Amino acid sequence: MTPEKLFHELLGLGLNWEAIESRFERESGTVFLEIRETPRLWETVRCLEDGGLAFCYDHTEVLTWRHLNVFQHRCEITCRLPRGKCRQCGQVFRGRPPWEGLSTHFTKEFEAFALLLMREMPMSKVGEVVGETDTRLWRMLFRQVDAAYAEADFSQVCCVGVDEMSVRKGHEYISVFADLVRKRVLFATEGKDHQVWLDFVTALEKHNGHRHAITQVSMDMSPAYEKGVKETCRHAQVVFDKFHVIAHANQAVDEVRRAEVRLGGAGVWEALRQSQWLWRKNPENLTEQEAARLAQIDQKSLRTAKAYQMRLVLQDIYRSASVLEARRRFRVWCRWVRWVARLQPKNLLRAMVKVAAMIERHLAGILAHWKWGVTNAFMERLNSVFSATKRKARGYRSTTHLITMLYFVAGKLRFPQF
Ligand SMILES: [Zn+2]
């Protein structure tokens, strides 16, 4: 078998195309495979407008498509694509050759391979491995994700989570909407005001979903999101998820620590120095060293230790077996926080009192956790998924790049080609 015949078989070119020459260019280390059409092609080509038969009008310049390597050598398919002319309407058109991927520079097989690598490593690394520019690879990913996203079906979506994610340090945010049942990202867009909800339901309904089919929305206690839900999804019950409630308490502990370092007087600075990570953990997760450090700290007199204790108790409330028990314990917790805070000088526990007030304001939504709790795990994971996405997209931090990568990583999209 000649090499050309072999390539013909391996590429599955069929009867309409033939490999006419293969050569190895030593300087560039590239295998070139030249393909051209056979007369039989014109028996099957039809005009896109009216389905009329076509004949060969002319040929394009020599075009190239990057294919999978041959024995570690770069391989490129070259072809002067025939352009057809319709016998009925006279229109001239360029067909798609069967090996072409969604981007005009790569074959289908190469795109499939590159996507596989993109799942495993950052984009810049993929570029190094396959020897392609980031720009071309990103363009390919855009085409693939756009095509797969267009086919995504949201008709079963009923439980939705939404969260804001920081794109850059500081003030640039996107809102990410997720399907909590099928555990996938549905939609992401710039901004974090109530308008993003309108964008979301528009996307949802483009994909066969329905805004009034949404029965549960899990989110942070942000007034903007709450307003957005109320305006768009009539039947949605808002659930403030555990993850966010505890995150607020964690933040408050940190605020208390910083206030105490500033205002606490002699000995306090020494005791709290570099302790911020201790307070973010649960006692059972501390390393031996950290546990020893915590034991050293004089817990009785420190407000930070008091705030930490409050956070632990709050977390424990989530172990309550029933919503009735939880309601009672949240109320007791809020009273207790206020009572303790009143006894402190300089209002050092102010941040904790704010958390209590927020819990009271949002109690119904917080208690909805006991009805829906099981579905919320995905929201907790979303933050780490998003960090991984940012690492993968490093170097290209335009929001569109980031959102495309997020759909690719967490959208559970089906890539129809493969
Ligand atoms: Zn035609």
Image: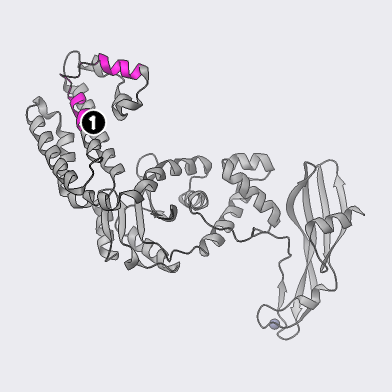
- The residue singled out by tag 1 in the image is 253
Q: Is residue 186 found left or right of 2 in the rendered image?
A: left
Q: Is residue 296 magenta?
A: yes
Q: Quadrant of the C terminus?
A: bottom right
Residue 299 in view: yes
State the predominant SS element of the stretch in magenta: helix
Q: Quadrant of ligand 1?
A: bottom right
Q: Nearer the viewer, residue 366 or 193?
A: 366
Q: Quadrant of residue 297?
A: top left
In this view, 193 is above or below 346: below
Residue furthest to the bottom in view is: 88
x then y, percent, for residue 128: 65, 39
Q: Nearer the viewer, residue 123 or 338?
A: 338
Image side of residue 341 versus residue 44, left or right: left
Question: From the viewer's perspective, is residue 254 above or below residue 58?
Answer: above
Using the rendered image of the protein, determine whether residue 34 is visible from the camera's viewpoint.
no
- Residue 331 located left or right of residue 378: left
Tell me the kind of residue under disc 1. Answer: Val
Relative to the observer, which residue lies in front, 375 or 239?
375
Q: Horizontal and vertical percent for residue 408?
A: 52, 51
- Give how far across and how far down residue 397 sits, in percent: 48, 45
Q: Nearer the viewer, residue 86 or 107?
A: 107
In the orientation shown, which residue stands out farthest toward the right? 1
| Element type at mark 1 | helix
Picture layout, residue 322 above or below residue 50:
above
Start and end of the magenta stretch? 289-310
Indicate whether residue 99 is drawn in magenta: no
